Amino acid sequence: MTAAGNRATVTEEGHAPYLSIRGLSKMFGEFAALSDVSLDVHEGDFVCFLGPSGCGKTTLLRAIAGLDIQTRGQIIQAGRDISALPPAERDFGIVFQSYALFPNLTVRNNVAYGLESRRAARAETARRVNELLDLVGLTEHADKYPSQISGGQQQRVALARALATSPGLLLLDEPLSALDAKVRVHLRREIKELQENLGVTTIMVTHDQEEALTMADRIVVMKQGRIEQVGTPEDIYGRPATPFIADFVGSMNFLKGTVTPGGRVRVGAVEFAAGEGLRAGQPATVCVRPEDVTVRGIAAADANAFPVSVATIEFLGSFWRATLRSEGDGGFELLADFSTNLVRDLGVREGAQFLVAVPPERILVFNGKS
Amino acid sequence: MSRPVIAVSPEGLAPVREPIRARMSADDKILLAATALIVGALLIGIAAPLYALLAKGFQNADGQFVGLANYRTYFSTPALFYSIGNSLVVTFITTLIAVPLAFLFAYGLTHTCMPFKSVFKGIALIPILMPSLLPAISLVYLFGNQGLAKGLLMGEPIYGPIGIVLGELFYVFPHALTILLIALSTSDARLYEAAESLGASKTRIFFTVTIPGVRYGLISAFFVVFTLVITDFGVPKVIGGKYNVLATDVYKQVVGRHDFEMGAVVSMILLGPAVLAFFADRLAERRQSAALTARAVPYEPKPKRGRDALFFAFSALIGAAILTVLAVAAYASWIKLWPYNLTLTNYHYQFDLRDGGGWASYRNSLVMAAWTAAIGTAVIFVGAYLVEKCRALPSARLALQFLAMVPMAVPGLVLGLAYVFFFNAPSNPLGGLYHTMAILVINTVVHFYTVAHLTAVTALKQLDAEFEAVSASLKVPVYKTFARVTVPVCAPAALDISMYLFVNAMTTVSAVVFLYAPHTALSSVAVLNMDDAGELASAAAMGMMIVYTSAAVRILHFALTQGLLARTQAWRKR
């Protein structure tokens, strides 16, 4: 596989990034929550910080906001060094997981909160608030209190309040994780559309890979205080830079094998053709996504075709997930996702035997044993 | 394993390697200045007086350092050090009776379906409205030389350990009850369901689910009662007779013998157990809160006739005892001469005809309580806010947190005497405060600081932690968010604090007894002085004035809280 161009400079070369983070570290006593993190974000981008809990993604967001200032390193926003500035002197709007809506103020007054102190004319403030309420579709709830509206609506109030002062940077800290699954899916699209219409540079922290894949222009995958990979959702999913990412984002089969003199990787009785530049005799891990296992129209002579039997098969609603066992010596297990009509057409059931194949271009190989 | 190429370090400037020194925002500066102000006030209000007291114990009457000489005198004078044993005896006996009684009462209120629960709870909390002198006065009426129920004591005098223990039981009961009610009402119904479905017997459930669940509540109640009793001065003063305890010794040394140095020594000895109990209680409290889970389901008792009847009888007995004590004091204050002439009269309420301060002392008490409630609530609430929110300088925050906890460990008598030594020192520029209303207010705010502080902290912790971060991102100054959001949302807690301070300012005797001047005499002190002068009925009458006032304030507080909740119901409703 290749990872060329897969560096932290997020968009077009030549343009100065809107936000530039250099060598950021954050220590909590002896514990390094961030180690030497560098990242560029360009204007108008929607960037997701993705990673398991404790990976440092929220710490990085809070450093950008100035809420927990980093131990070392530099942050430059719109050409201004904001590294040591308190939050009030930075330019951002923020939505927290809890929303932090003011419970004793109406929706309207929550949204207007940041505008009132700016000495704008009252009529001007009212106009702006109405515009924002309209934007997030809450005009009819304007005079309700936060406890009287639903979680999804509260989330939109928080968003409108953060956008009211037209900040250059919008920070979202797990903004959807407190919501029901259905509302979450709906709001994903809404937030993304809003962000595209306003063109505001946005950073969202999430531990939900689906959220990151559907919303982000670029995903920053983090692990143990470091950046593992930066790339488009397609990059991250299709060309994960490390086994960690391959495992964390989506489902992945990890098959341990050895590189043959022919440059293939032997796993059990199967030899996988994949990429180049592998050294013969070295251990290697073949990564295959369950949805990349193909069944229809395969001949024994096709590349990466091998016989399997179905060990178990599980109905997951819109598709089926099968555990396949390869035939022959050193048989291995492989997860595969099959559509309902494929299962019906081919009569896939436990014990069934057939040929499967994995297209070489869909295979990832990592050196060593992961 | 080797990794495919990823460059996470963009080309360009080399990163700056020096540690970042965060710039303080305007908000940080405001919070820091306010923190410094309150820390300064508490240094003057608690730390410096305690130091003055400590120093006094090592000085002779001329102010020269004499090392441990005073302590040596103390421990070689049996009349003095016997009081330690006496104090411990009555304190342990009271604690060992009060905590189980309060536990059973609380259990009845939370774990049975007996009728009139809220009535019983209301009655049990009545003693909070009284100065501790009042139950003792009632006991004198009941069991004293002309007492109605004197025969019950089978010849033993009420003056002495029996009277002290009985009086203290009334005084501490509501405090123990409150702690145990909280502990018992947070018990998790799911544990009971699990135990029942596993076939555990009722007794087994009680010992394996109920008791472990309230373990720390019991420990906490034990230490709180212990501290209250060992440091209480009102009950032994009225009914202790010749049975000396530490608290009355401090008073006698200072007021009776003008031996300030010995007063300081006894104070330090009294401080010891109080401080120990304080730390033990804090430890228990920390465990208790760790044992609580946010997802606990409240326990709902099911009716069970035998058990409910038993607890009803028990609660009725306790309730009757408390009402009797109250009724005796009230009745005795309205009749000519207990128990010989039962004609109703307001004679005993004509305080101006007696020594002790007259009606002026009552007015002084109202003024003092009002100022204490107003200033105390503002300072303590802001202080608690700063403890929660001042992040710019952690050491300032920690200092404030520590100083806010100190008053709880300091008995009122000790605090009062410490104020005498500190503010009455000729070299103190604040000496002008001595013998003013201001020093009474300051002293009372400090005396009751900790409980009010903890109430405020609890209320503040329920707010979203990110309000300040959101305001900062919106460029709204922190004081504006404090005024527009924090204070309105915490208004019920602020009302609770002001009521707590008002009622305690009305009923307290121990600290202010050393600090009042003739023109600032307080009604609680008047109770003490009238009792001293043998005017028992007038003492009861003044004590009842305090009860009437505290009760009225409680009712007013209830109405205000209801009104506030109704007005803000829209946004409080979930």
Image (tube, coloured by chain):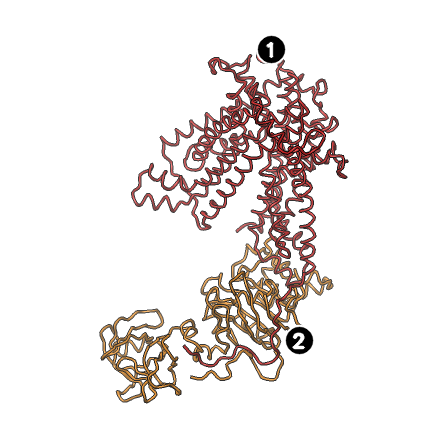
Q: Nearer the viewer, residue B422 or B194?
A: B422
Disc 2 and disc 1: Cα gap in Å? 93 Å
Crowd rating for badge 1 (residues with CA inside 10 Å; few <14, some 14–19, many 20+): few
Quick one: SS at disc 2? Answer: loop
**Up-down relation of residue A12 to residue B244 (above or below):** below
Tell how many labels: 2
* B120 sits to left or right of A43: left
Q: Colour of chain B?
A: red
Q: Secondary structure at mark 1?
A: strand
Q: Nearer the viewer, mark 2 or mark 1?
A: 2
Categorize mark 2 by other alpha carbons within 10 Å: few (<14), some (14-19), many (20+). Answer: few
Kindly identify the residue that appears in the image at 52 percent across and 59 percent down. A150
Residue type, mark 1 in image: Asn
Q: Out of A13 and A267, give the one closest to the viewer.
A: A267
Chain designation of label 2: A
Q: Which residue is mark 2?
A: A79
Front residue of this view, candidates B1 and A83: B1
Task: Tell me where residue B347 appears, x and y as whole percent.
Answer: 67, 16
Q: What's the chain of the residue with tag 1?
A: B
Q: Which residue is mark 1?
A: B341
Whole-percent x, y for residue A251 in the image: 38, 73
